[in-house]
Every structure is written in structure tokens, then in C-alpha cells.
Amino acid sequence: YISSTKPLKIRFINGLSLPRVQCPNHPDTILVEDYRAGDMICPECGLVVGDRVIDVGSEWRTFSNEKALKDPSRVGDAQNPLLNGGDLTTMISKGTGAASFDEFGNSKYQNRRTMSSSDRAMLNAFKEISTMADRINLPRNIIDRTNNLFKQVYEQKSLKGRANDAIASACLYIACRQEGVPRTFKEICAVSRISKKEIGRCFKLILKALETSVDLITTGDFMSRFCSNLGLPKQVQMAATFIARKAVELDLVPGRSPISVAAAAIYMASQASAEKKTQKEIGDIAGVADVTIRQSYRLIYPRAAELFPPDFKFDTPVDKLPQL
């Protein structure tokens, strides 16, 4: 709120009247704000045009030698729109000193109980989602989408009887698929305490409850990440991507999981290059068994000559590739 010593000039913009504080003698001059005194001053003539200006700056001073420390310019967590109370409730932890308890030994401060059980459950789930996402280096937009999915499922009460951790894990899997950075069930299972089977069940129930869908996964969704984790060069990655796409186009791997096809393509491309990788090394990264890689590899091996890109530099000729 600004109290002006002079009448306010009224501007009309698109039919709306907007008050503007300006110097009556120099209306086009940009006023200087003196936050210490709370005044707005005309720099041309020194007239105090407005007083009692509210300081919207930081409440704390931050010195240069404190930059590495936590900035106290704002206190408290940011608002969480996913919680019913806007996350504006005060939560007081259990006291440790004598002043925290009455003469009967009961805690004097029990504000935590004012938080509803549903908000507390969602808050715990959001923490679990954030922890899981951090373990597999997922960005913030994935976490936000997962939180929104979990809230929708939780408020619908369509998965009653299922553990919140299982629902959270399934929501994280769906969010990754919807954002175009899919993760395998085994990768999600590795960072959660829930079995792959239970995550799969919740995944199907959530899609049905929310009436949503996810794009089908392809071999290209995993190729760059698998090759990067295996330390393979760009040439091998491009060859493996080409092999997998060509195998799907020629319908050589009907009914096979895109993950197993990607693993088989990586095995074939690496065996033809100088950077050879074993089935076990690839299986550990891709999360598939050696026998699964072998089965997919046997399906594409007979037409291996057609699958490699024309500009691929062979270290091992096609006819010398392992037959398994």
C-alpha cells in the first residue's frame, strides 16, 4: 500500500483504470525508491511523491563469505499445491528439552496432529518418489508428474488395499513412459522395496483407473543409455540402433520384448567391432538374462549381413560372428 502526498494520476489501459504514482512536475521521470525511509522520490526535483512503500526485499542480509551456506533470505519450504492445506500447516518435531513437556510428561506442542492422515500419507509417498528418482538420476519434471499421478490415484481410492510404495513405484514407471524416458520394471524395482510383480499389477490398475495410456516402448528408447553404461563408442551405438530397427522392420523378432531385442542388437554390433562385450555384461546393464539375449540373437543372426549399416567398419566380418 502506497500513501501519496499528491493526487494519483489515473491511466486507462484497454478500458481498465490503473493508478500510477508520478511526479506532478516531471510525469515521465522514473521515480527512485528509498527503501530505508520508505519513500518514492523524484530524481529531478527531489519531491517525495509517495511514502510508506513496502520493502519486498530479503529479510536477511547475505554476505559474500556466506554464499556457500544455506541462504536465509527466505524461510520455510515452498508451497506444495498437491497437499490440501497448500503445505502451510506448521509441523513441530518431538521436543527434547524440559520446556517441551508439562508436569505429567506430555508434549506441550502437538501441532503435527492437525495434519490430516491423507496429507501425511501423500507427503510420505512424495518423499519416497523423490528418493527413488534421485537414485536413478531422474529430472524434476518426472518427479512432478509422478506426484500428480499418485495424488489422482490416492484421491480416487481406486487402489485400496495396495501399498502406497507400490502405487508410487508404478506411478514413477508411468511418468517415465509418458515423458519419453522409459525405464524398465527391473530398474524401478531396484530402487524401490516392491517386487516387480506387484509394480506390474499396480501399473495395469492405475492405467485402468485413470483411463490413461502410455506410448509403446521401442528399442531406441533404451539404446543410448545401455550403450553409454557399457562404455561403447558412438559408432557401435549407431550400428546397434540400426540393427534393432531393421530387425523389427523385417519382422525377425515377433513377440520379443524391445529390451531383449536391443540387448541382442548391442551384442551383435559389439562383436563386429573392436569393443566386444559378453552376453553377461550386456545382460547386467539391460536387466535381461543371458538366455534371453541368445534367443533373440539367434533370430536375427541368419540375416546379419542385411542388418548392419552400409558405412559400418567391421573389425570382425559378418561370417565370423558367433553363431551361439
Image: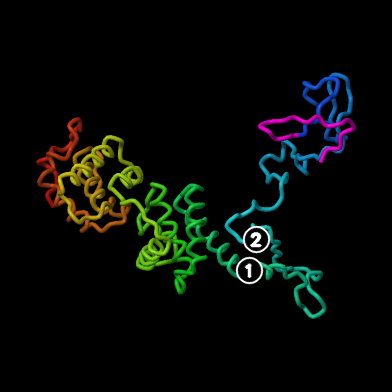
- Indicate whether residue 8 is drawn in magenta: yes
Task: In the rendered structure, find residue 116 and report the number of the disc placed on it.
Answer: 1
Residues shaded magenta? 1-18
Going by the numbered disc 1, the residue's amino acid type is: Ser
Residue 252: x percent and y percent? 15, 49
Residue at point 18%, 53% (across, down): 296
* Distance (Cα) linking label 2 and label 1: 9 Å
Amino acid carrying mark 2 in the image: Gly
Relative image position of residue 62 (x, y in whole percent): 74, 39
Q: In x, y percent, where is residue 31? A: 80, 26
Question: For residue 96, which quarter of the picture?
Answer: bottom right
Where on the picture, by quarter, is residue 313?
Answer: top left
Disc 2 residue crowd, few under 14, some 14–19, many 20+, Cα 10 Å: few
At 56% across and 67% down in the image, what residue appears? Answer: 121
Give the residue at mark 2. Answer: 85
Q: Are marks 2 and 1 in contact (CB under 8 Å)?
A: yes
Q: Could you tell which of marks 2 and 1 lies nearer the N-terminus?
A: 2
Asked if residue 154 is positioned above or below residue 258 in the image, the reply reads: below
For the view shown, which residue lies furthest in the bottom direction?
Answer: 104
* Element carrying mark 1: loop
